[in-house]
Image: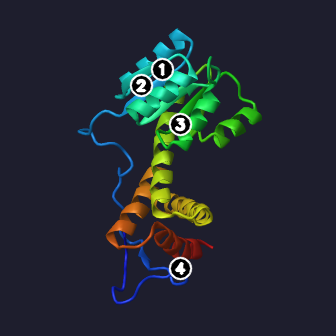
Amino acid sequence: MHVTKDDSTEPTQDAPQAVNLSAEPARGAGTPSAGRPARRAVVAEDEALIRMDVVETLTEAGFEVVGEAGDGERAVELATELRPDVVVMDVKMPVLDGISAAERIGKAHLAPVVLLTAFSQTELVERARDAGAMAYVVKPFSPADLLPAVEIAISRYAQITALESEVADLAERFETRKRVDRAKGLLMTKMGLSEPESFRWIQKTSMDRRLTMREVADAVIEQVGGASS
């Protein structure tokens, strides 16, 4: 799968570049390789038994838990100091609650946050989203609940970070994210890719062809979306 580009002219948003869907994109682009270093995690939970359970679950899944905290203030300190790949944090904690801590971590662009909660009210989910949490898990949970949420959080955070580094203007960034999300959905439906694989293909194509991710997304929407309408 590749994007064809005429080097004699610069691409424009009004004329998206052609996308050849005849070749299958490389699979597994969104999964970690066996030889890469263990991803690092911080776990913040004021109930020691639950914290131990989370640490054990992450460790067995190949993560290195580099810090543990019993309150939100300490969780922010550890995230600032250690810059982990993910923070798994309870909502209800002393000193500083998990949602407020997630907001601080998110504003400082320190790490993706997965929130643990014993409540599933819509208001709490909205607060968690507004605070910048990438995912949340309702207690009681199993490894089958926690680990996919952690992977989703890491993947979404990487995508958002990549888009933010490409687009400075906030309004333009929002529109770019919408178009990339739509293009990812089309690639997932058309090519049977996972969400991380779809994003990685868009990202790699933009780098290989010296296009922005928005231009690649527009090309996918124009051709795949048009063909399926």
Residue 54's mark?
1
**Cα distance between the residues tagged 2 and 3:** 20 Å
Q: What colouring does the structure picture have?
A: rainbow
- In the picture, measured across the screen, residue 19 lies left or right of residue 38, that is right
Q: Residue at x 47, y 39 (%)?
A: 111
Secondary structure found at label 4: loop
Residue 32 is at least partly visible in this image: yes
Query: Which of the marked residues, 3 or 4, is nearer the chain's N terminus?
Result: 4
- In the image, what residue type sits under mark 2? Leu
Query: Which of the marked residues, 3 or 1, is nearer the chain's N terminus?
Result: 1
What residue is disc 4 on? 13
Give residue 32's position: percent from left, percent from top: 33, 42
Q: Residue at x 49, y 19 (%)?
A: 69
Residue placed farthest to the bottom in the image? 8
Residue contact between numbered discs 2 and 3, judged by CB atoms under 8 Å = no
Secondary structure found at label 3: helix
Secondary structure found at label 1: helix
Residue contact between numbered discs 2 and 4, judged by CB atoms under 8 Å = no
- In the picture, measured across the screen, residue 192 lies left or right of residue 140, that is left
Residue 105's mark?
3
Q: Which quadrant holds the C terminus?
A: bottom right
Closest to the camera, between mark 2 and mark 3, is: 3
What residue is disc 2 on? 58
The one nearer the camera, 38 or 74, is 74
Give residue 84's position: percent from left, percent from top: 40, 34
